[in-house]
Amino acid sequence: MLLAGLLHATWHAIVKTGGGLSILAGMGLVSGIVAMPVLFFVPAPSASTWPIILVSLALHAGYKASLAAAYRSAEFGRAYPIARGTVPLFAALFAFVALQQIPAPGQLAGISMIVLGIFGLAHDRLERMIDRRALWAAICAAAMVAGYSVVDASGTRQPEGWGSFTAWIIVLDSIVFFILAALYRGPEIWGELRHARLRVLVAGLLGLISFAVFLWALSRNPIANVVAFRECSVLFATLLGVSFLNERATLQRLGCAALIATGLVTIALLKPA
């Protein structure tokens, strides 16, 4: 999950560098094309799995649209922490409602430390307040991530197995979101994709690996814990923002990163309830 977190933060940084919605659509196509041959070697979704896939597709589309909106109006080092910061709380809530999974008290403490650390990164006192539209878009993205985490966890545990669900959701999601993005952007999307073709290719491959590892982990572990571990990507995002996007490394940001690391260690050392 640490590797998945690094890959996840990296492709988000690529999306932030320009053409958010188009790059998201293009990278989805790359992932879908790579995953498509796998469909010939895995079982087709059963009747009980298709409703899960449809709900997941809607949540993934909502997440990407919200993410693009957040990145349009805010810096990467601030929008990303908010978009990821509230995910563990939403995920724990949704997992309890849908699957009755209850994290242990120590794990809840770890999740709380991660959330506090991430919000500290997002609200650096040396920076001006984040744009309100970006704030709500990022929170909406977090809710969508938590929602599809619960839904996808259910999908990976269907009789066909996590490999089948992963391949089908990646391919179908790439098609659905590209159609939606093309309808919204119009003919301009093709020029934007040509201009960012290298970034689209790299982001697509990184996103594919990151998401496949994430679904594999969801199929074998409690949802809240997997989602919390995935948020280690915020640590990498902080480093990427400072190193490649010319963002400031303040003491508050470094302290919040340490708090997140403490939360991750807390979760790692405890067994689920």
Image (tube, rainbow, N blue to C red):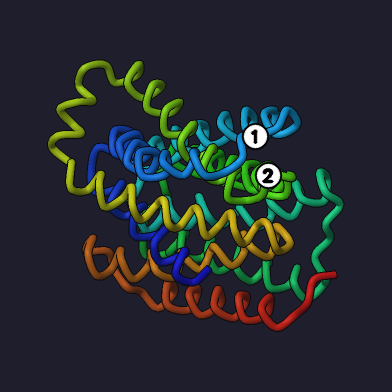
At horizontal 25% and vertical 37% (from top left) the residue drawn is: 19
Determine whether the residue tagged by mark 1 lies in a helix, strand or loop.
loop
- Residue under pointer 2: 160
Specify whether residue 120 is in view: yes
Q: Position of residue 250 (x, y in %)?
A: 35, 74
Q: Quadrant of the C terminus?
A: bottom right
Q: Position of residue 5 (x, y in %)?
A: 46, 64
At horizontal 51% and vertical 38% (from top left) the residue drawn is: 63
At horizontal 19% and vertical 26% (from top left) the residue drawn is: 190
Determine whether the residue tagged by mark 2 lies in a helix, strand or loop.
loop
The answer to whether residue 2 is above or below residue 204 is below
Q: Are marks 1 and 2 in contact (CB under 8 Å)?
A: yes
Specify whether residue 136 is in view: no
- Residue under pointer 1: 45
Q: Nearer the viewer, residue 123 or 198?
A: 198
Image position of 97 (left or right of 255)? right
Amino acid type of the residue that numbered disc 2 sits on in the rendered structure: Glu
Amino acid type of the residue that numbered disc 1 sits on in the rendered structure: Pro
Q: Quadrant of residue 124?
A: bottom left
Q: Residues within 10 Å of mark 2 (few under 14, many from 20)?
A: some
Q: Nearer the viewer, residue 50 or 17?
A: 50
Tell which residue pokes out farthest to the front in this image: 41
Q: Residues within 10 Å of mark 1 (few under 14, many from 20)?
A: some
The answer to whether residue 9 is above or below residue 68 is below
At horizontal 24% and vertical 48% (from top left) the residue drawn is: 17
